[in-house]
Image (cartoon, rainbow, N blue to C red):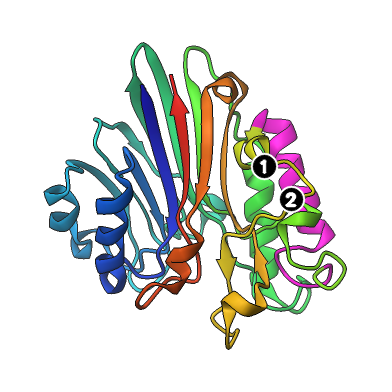
């Protein structure tokens, strides 16, 4: 029996609900995790998702910025929102769900982008990003009786082949050594398994984001892997495949991120 979870930075859920619906009709994930929904909780377009079978929806919203949501076909419990860095941003939500006899904690993150200059002394946004990922290092994948999945736009491409040019991006926010080392530290200290790289190991390239600034994003193909799916080690053997839907970057009014789906066979 298969079970699927999709993560997608949608960059305004109200603006892009038509392509969310298009994706769901075609791919029908069991759980859909959205980031950068850019709306308050009462503004979230619940009905289109409920009409498509997602009766269980939890939202951590914020006016105009950030925001994360989980829409599920299976019941969700223990809605939890962590206030990272104590600034009140809506960047995290988690819930418990069950698959057979297995209980799974699902985390959905939207890590700060960090601005353009990788120097916290002149760019507070970069300092905020570094502080945020430092706090994430306490998040453990292994908990008694509960498996874990972590998804989201983590805004860091940690490996050489997660970007179009490792050398050219070493001083670009999202691929600087201080960021990539921090992400690797989060995974090591928390016991997290990088499911995307389990499915597609290096040196194969993986991209999930293509900039709006590119005149022809597809021809240039200067992508980065900013969206991630991790799990506790016990779920690794059940991963069947990872699907990165590159074609969604070319849909009508697209996000600059594309959906990434993990399909499990339990």
| Cα–Cα span, label 2 and label 1 | 7 Å
> Which residue sits at x=83%, y=64%?
166
Q: Quadrant of the C terminus?
A: top left
* Residue 176 within the magenta-colored segment of the rendering: yes
Of all residues, the one furthest to the front in this rendering is 219
The residue tagged with tag 2: helix, strand or loop? Answer: loop
Residue 94, compared with residue 26, is above or below; it is above
> Which residue sits at x=60%, y=36%?
195
Per the image, the residue denoted by label 1 is: 200
Query: x%, y% of residue 121?
Result: 78, 74
Is 38 displayed left or right of 156 in the figure?
Answer: left
Q: Compare residues 97 and 79 and report the one nearer the observer.
A: 97
Per the image, the residue denoted by label 2 is: 204
Query: x%, y% of residue 25?
Result: 24, 52
> Which residue sits at x=50%, y=33%?
149
Query: x%, y% of residue 95?
Result: 37, 34
Q: Compare residues 2 and 62 and report the one nearer the observer.
A: 2
The residue tagged with tag 1: helix, strand or loop? Answer: loop
Asked which quadrant contains residue 223, the reply is bottom right
Query: x%, y% of residue 152?
Result: 51, 50
Is 103 displayed left or right of 26 in the figure?
Answer: right
Is 19 displayed left or right of 265 in the figure?
Answer: left
Would you call the spot at circle 2 few (<14 residues within 10 Å), some (14-19), or many (20 or more)? few
Magenta-drawn segment: 170-192
The tag on residue 187 is: none
Residue 74, compared with residue 237, is above or below; it is below
Residue 235, compared with residue 24, is above or below; it is above
Would you call the spot at circle 1 few (<14 residues within 10 Å), some (14-19), or many (20 or more)? few
Q: Compare residues 215 and 106 and report the one nearer the observer.
A: 215
Q: Quadrant of the N terminus?
A: top left
Of all residues, the one furthest to the right in this rendering is 167
| Pointers 2 and 1 in contact (C-beta within 8 Å) | yes
């Amino acid at each position: 029996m298969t079970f699927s979870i999709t993560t997608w930075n949608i960059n305004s859920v109200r603006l892009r609900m038509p392509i969310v619906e298009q994706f769901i009709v075609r791919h029908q994930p069991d759980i859909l995790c959205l980031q950068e929904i850019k709306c308050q909780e009462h503004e979230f377009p619940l009905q289109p998702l409920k009409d498509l079978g997602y009766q269980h929806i939890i939202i951590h919203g914020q006016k105009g910025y950030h925001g994360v949501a989980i829409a599920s076909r299976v019941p969700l419990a223990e809605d939890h929102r962590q206030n990272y860095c104590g600034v009140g941003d809506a960047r995290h939500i988690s819930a418990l769900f069950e698959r057979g006899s297995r209980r799974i904690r699902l985390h959905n993150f939207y890590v700060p982008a960090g601005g353009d200059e990788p120097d916290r002394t002149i760019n507070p946004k970069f300092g905020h990003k570094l502080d945020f990922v430092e706090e994430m290092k306490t998040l453990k994948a292994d908990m008694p009786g509960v498996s874990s999945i972590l998804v989201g736009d983590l805004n860091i491409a940690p490996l050489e082949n997660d970007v179009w040019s490792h050398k050219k991006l070493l001083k670009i926010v999202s691929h600087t050594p201080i960021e990539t080392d921090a992400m690797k530290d989060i995974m090591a200290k928390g016991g997290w398994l990088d499911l995307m790289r389990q499915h597609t190991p290096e040196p194969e390239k993986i991209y999930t984001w293509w900039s709006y600034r590119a005149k022809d994003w597809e021809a240039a193909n200067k992508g980065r892997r900013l969206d991630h799916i991790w799990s506790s080690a016990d779920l690794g053997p059940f991963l069947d495949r990872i699907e990165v839907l590159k074609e969604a970057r070319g849909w009508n009014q697209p996000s600059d991120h594309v959906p990434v789906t993990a399909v499990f066979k339990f």
